[in-house]
Image (spheres, rainbow, N blue to C red):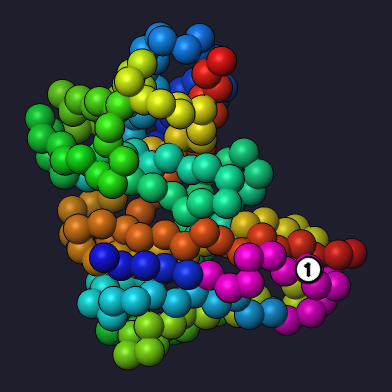
Amino acid sequence: DGGITQSPKYLFRKEGQNVTLSCEQNLNHDAMYWYRQDPGQGLRLIYYSQIVNDFQKGDIAEGYSVSREKKESFPLTVTSAQKNPTAFYLCASSPTDRASPLHFGNGTRLTVT
Amino acid sequence: KQEVTQIPAALSVPEGENLVLNCSFTDSAIYNLQWFRQDPGKGLTSLLLIQSSQREQTSGRLNASLDKSSGRSTLYIAASQPGDSATYLCAANTGNQFYFGTGTSLTVIP
């Protein structure tokens, strides 16, 4: 079955450590996205990529970094510069056709103490 | 910038009732509008996608409508069931980005 796999489901880190969240898709989608979800707030876009080796900042990119070396993979690194990293992180993908739907993974809950 | 609003934020109904969830957006220049369901601690599951040229889409007990000119979409759920309890989100696709509402948390009481 095609889909988006995010790992791990839960992640715990100490403050000051960088951490990388994995996102892999086998839907053959060109575009991939990272969103952050906090209680009471809508999904906020961190980074997106529409093609391999290219990506753009979203609304809340500060303190995060990404890479897109393969079409299937779009890992997100939460750096120590992110002031409030504890959140639910969602990865999504879509074809680049603007009329196509968005597909989501099951998310990673990151807790930083 | 596109802003998406969902009202009400929470809704509680008895089993079997028909209900309507609302989604409004400020910029009518959208390619499509997508409705999602989210269960606690899970990702978003796509329910319905309405293209900008369409007025409505149906899937089983779900019917979504779109009125671009007024910047509104509704999700109609017929004969609600306890298994429908979840948060429902809408997202407006501007072609470059997807803009999400904060969701409506639905509880269906047996």
Q: Which residues are magenta?
A: B6-18
- In the picture shown, does residue A85 fall above or below B96? above
Viewer-closest of B67 and B78 = B67
Could you say where residue B109 lies in the image, as x and y percent from the top left? 86, 65
Is A8 drawn above or below residue B110 in the view shown? above
Judged from this view, the residue extending furthest toward the bottom is B69
Q: Is residue B13 magenta?
A: yes
- Taking A84 as reference, is B38 left or right? right
Q: Amino acid at mark 1?
A: Ser
User: Badge 1: few (under 14), some or many (20 or more) residues near its Cα, within 10 Å?
Assistant: few
Asked which quadrant contains residue A52, the reply is top left
Residue A17: image quadrant is top left
| Horizontal and vertical percent position of residue B19 | 69, 79
Q: Chain of mark 1?
A: B
Residue annotated with mark 1: B12
Q: The residue tagged with tag 1: helix, strand or loop?
A: strand
Q: Residue furthest left?
A: A53
**Which quadrant of the figure contains the N terminus of chain B?**
bottom left
In this view of the protein, can residue A93 be seen by the observer? no
Is residue A94 visible to the viewer in this orientation of the structure? yes
Residue found 58% across the figure and 41% down from its top: B42
In the foreground, A40 or A107: A40
Left or right placement of residue B90 versus residue B62 in this view: left
Query: Looking at the picture, how far across and down is residue B101, in whole percent?
Result: 47, 62
Residue B79 painted magenta: no
Instruction: Kindly identify the residue that appears in the image at 26 percent across and 57 percent down.
Output: B97
Q: Position of residue B43 (x, y in %)?
A: 52, 43
Total numbered labels:
1
Report the residue at 69% width, 65% height from top: B10
Q: Choose top left, top right, bottom left or bottom right for residue B67.
A: bottom left
- Residue pictured at 30% horizontal, 26% vertical: A63
